[in-house]
Image (cartoon, rainbow, N blue to C red):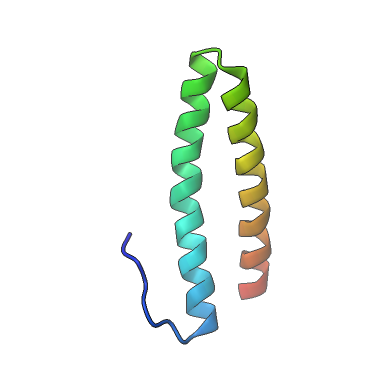
Amino acid sequence: MNESSEVSDGNLAVKNILDSFKTIITLQRELLDLSADADDEGTNALMSDYIRAQEKLVWMYSAYLK
């Protein structure tokens, strides 16, 4: 995904943020799987917390757009 510049439309900006979160959450889920396979409970807990917080933001931004 390419970086946006000079965005003047608020809804477009929120859509770009949502797209970015989807990319980040996908990568974090991969990390979550890897940390689970490695029995790395600390990283697993940290990634789980990050994902939960970001999914809440995705929900709020999605609700805003509706």
Residue located 57% across and 26% down the image: 43
The answer to whether residue 66 is visible is no
From this viewpoint, which residue is outermost toward the left?
A: 2
Q: Quadrant of the C terminus?
A: bottom right
Residue located 46% across and 68% down the image: 16
In the depicted structure, whether residue 33 falls above or below residue 14: above
Q: Quadrant of the N terminus?
A: bottom left
Residue located 48% across and 52% down the image: 22
| Residue 54 appears left or right of 26 | right
The percent position of residue 59, horizontal first and vertical second, equals: 66, 58
From this viewpoint, which residue is outermost toward the top?
A: 39
From this viewpoint, which residue is outermost toward the bottom?
A: 8
| Residue 31 appears left or right of 43 | left
Asked whether 28 or 59 is in front, the reply is 28
In the depicted structure, whether residue 65 falls above or below residue 37: below
Residue located 45% across and 32% down the image: 30
The percent position of residue 63, horizontal first and vertical second, equals: 67, 68
| Residue 21 appears left or right of 60 | left
| Residue 52 appears left or right of 32 | right
